[in-house]
Every structure is written in structure tokens, then in C-alpha cells.
Image (cartoon, rainbow, N blue to C red):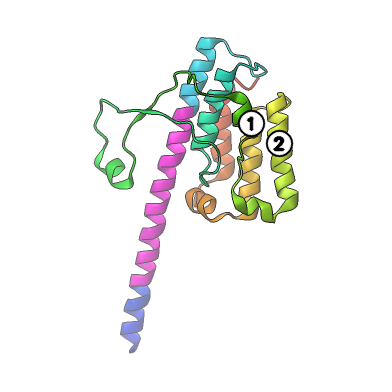
Amino acid sequence: MGFFDELGSKFFNNLTNKLHKDVSSLYNNKFIEQDVNTAKEIVKIYIDKNFKNTSSNPYKFYLEAIFLGMSDRTCSHPYLVKIIPSSKSPSFINTQMGFQNNEIDYKEDPDFNLIDYFNTNWFHPIVDSYLEKKQELEKSKQLYKSGDISFFDYFVKRLEVYDFIQEKEHMKHYEGIDRKKYLDILRSEFRLILR
């Protein structure tokens, strides 16, 4: 391979890598946007229902489960999201990326069982390989269940653990995302219900 062939090959490899990072970043930012919009919608319902952070109402936990399920990029948390087709057409870019512009149905689910929900496994199987981290997640889950910490505190711990473990899907879907900024934005959205 000649000098110019090698130079051209490096150029196209760099271009391909940059394009992959740009598409990945765009895709991951759509997930972040989805998390923030879900947070806003949950806060509105919390306020409308006059829920307190310490409330043991199953519907409050159901709403929090929607957020925890949607924001778990490993798809290990119970996923309770039910969708309503949107009346608005998705943008071309959303369609190409798999985001269909549907809305979440936040109505109470009569089949939601709080005991069953807390008895299900919420962790990706890789966590079993990290005993100390698994214990941290289990403790955090128990503290959330007992009302000693909020669902957001549990969410932050889960993010820390999966970042530490470097679970493949989690890392792929949070690639290029500033975790501090992401958490600050979500904390700001949830601030009224985390007091």
C-alpha cells in the first residue's frame, strides 16, 4: 500500500469513526430528552395527585417504576410503560432512529402489584459478578422500598454501579453523555417531588 493509499484509508477510517460517534451521540441524546420529558410528566401527575415523596401509594411507585424502567439502558428493570399512539407524526430523524413519537399512558394499572414489583429482579445478570456492587444495589433498592431514600437516589446509585461495571448496553447508550449534567437536569426537573 502506497503512502497516499494509507493516508486515504486513515482519512476514511477517521471519517467513519466520527460519523459513528455523531450518530451515537444523537441517538443517546434522544434517550436523554425522553428521560427529561418523562420526568416532567411524572412531576405533573405527582403534583396533581398531591403525592408526597414519602407516600406509600402504589400508584406513586408505579409512576416511579415507569421512569426507572425507561432510564435503565440495560433493560433489566421491570418495564411497565404502556404507550398511546401520538396524533403527531414523528419527524424523519425520529423515525430513522426508531423513536416513534408515542406518548406514555400514565393511568393507574389495576394489575400493578407493589409486592410483586419489589420482589422481581431489577439488576442485569453481570451484577452477579460484582458482589460488592450487587450488595450496594440491593441495599439501595431496600432503602427505596422502605422510603429511606427516593427513587431518584436509587436511580443515581444504579447509574454509578453500571458505570463502574461498564455493562455493555449501558455504556453504549450513555456514550458521550455528561453524567453530571444529565443528573443535574433530572434533579432540577424532579426537585418539587424530591423534597
Answer above or below: position of 62 versus 27.
Answer: above
Tell me which residue sits at (28%, 42%) in the image: 95
Residue 2 occupies quadrant: bottom left
Disc 1 residue type (three-letter): Phe
Mark 2 and mark 1: Cα distance apart in space: 12 Å
Mark 2 or 1: the one toward you:
1
The kind of secondary structure element at disc 1 is helix
- In the rendering, which numbered label is found on residue 140? 2
Decide if residue 185 is in sight here: no
Residue 14 drawn in magenta: yes
Residues drawn in magenta? 12-38
Decide if residue 154 is in sight here: yes
Residue 106 occupies quadrant: top left
Mark 1 burial class by Cα count in 10 Å: few <14, some 14-19, many 20+: some
Q: Which residue is mark 1?
A: 118
- In the rendering, which numbered label is found on residue 192? none
Q: Quadrant of the N terminus?
A: bottom left
The kind of secondary structure element at disc 2 is helix
Disc 2 residue type (three-letter): Ser
Q: Along the horizontal axis of the image, is 128 left or right of 75?
A: right
Q: Along the horizontal axis of the image, is 127 left or right of 3?
A: right
**Place of residue 193 in the rendered image (x, y in percent of width and height, measured from the top left):** 59, 19
**Place of residue 86 in the rendered image (x, y in percent of width and height, measured from the top left):** 29, 27
Name which of mark 2 and mark 1 comes first in the sequence: 1
Main SS, magenta region, reads: helix
**Place of residue 46 in the rendered image (x, y in percent of width and height, measured from the top left):** 54, 16
Residue lying furthest bottom: 2
Answer above or below: position of 193 versus 3.
Answer: above
**Place of residue 136 in the rendered image (x, y in percent of width and height, measured from the top left):** 73, 43
Tell me which residue sits at (67%, 18%) in the image: 54
Q: Quadrant of the C terminus?
A: top right
Tell me which residue sits at (63%, 31%) in the image: 118
